Amino acid sequence: MLKKIRANTFVATTVLAPVTYASVPTLALTWDTNVNTVSMTSSQEAKIQRAEEKIKAVVASSTFRSRVLNHTYRGVKKFVDNNGLTNSQIYYKILYAAEKLQPSKNNTMDMGIKTYYENSNTVGWTSTGSTYINMNTKFLNNYTSTNVTRNMMHEWLHKLGFSHAVSYSTSRDYSVPYGIGRIMEELAANY
Ligand SMILES: [Zn+2]
């Protein structure tokens, strides 16, 4: 009887442990954020900081790794507008976190955030020539920190060099910024 219990324990250890820890590269666990906010209210700032914590927790998770590696478009494991990269290469690009304008592989999301107000449907925008992203307070003020993670991830992925179609199309939702932004928000809701 005792032998059987020990045998079961052994099975549980070897089967379960890799799911939570071993499948995530060390780079996922050490991944960090370095986000500068400009002229924000204290509640806007607190929301961004909470969003940063959630993004870090998601990137460290094996679920995030699995969702990115297994992302499919029309039955094929890939992203739209993937710059010729496989899902695995995109995952590592996120972990290395070498932005176009801050190209060291420092394992850190480097980004600034400025706010603006506009009565439009645009949540935010960024340009390739700037290390900052712009967030529309019309949305930011009503968003939860979980909602904000999606926007931050989306705009930051532009900083890594990923783009998408300008106007809406079904395939655009499967681009790197839209696809991984959506995954981020979904998983951030767990924290
Ligand atoms: Zn975009």
Image: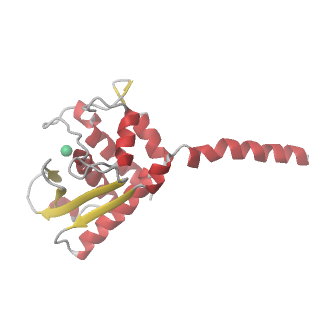
Q: Is residue 146 above or below residue 182?
A: below
Judge whether residue 190 can be spotted in this image: no
x, y (%) of residue 27? 45, 50
Q: Is residue 165 above or below residue 110?
A: above
Image quadrant where one finds the C terminus: bottom left
User: Splitting the image into 4 quarters, where does residue 178 fall?
Assistant: top left
x, y (%) of residue 185? 35, 51
Outermost residue toward the top in this view? 75
Judge whether residue 18 can be spotted in this image: yes
* 121 horizontally vs 144: left or right: left
Viewer-nearest residue: 133 or 171: 133
Viewer-nearest residue: 44 or 155: 155
User: Splitting the image into 4 quarters, where does residue 168 fall?
Assistant: top left
Applied colour scheme: secondary structure
Outermost residue toward the front in this view? 104
x, y (%) of residue 41? 21, 74
x, y (%) of residue 165? 16, 35
Question: Who's the residue at 22% across and 47% down the image?
Answer: 100
Question: Who's the residue at 79% across and 44% down the image?
Answer: 8
Ligand 1 falls in quadrant: top left
User: Splitting the image into 4 quarters, where does residue 15 fall?
Assistant: top right
Viewer-nearest residue: 140 or 35: 35
Outermost residue toward the left in this view? 119
Outermost residue toward the right in this view? 1
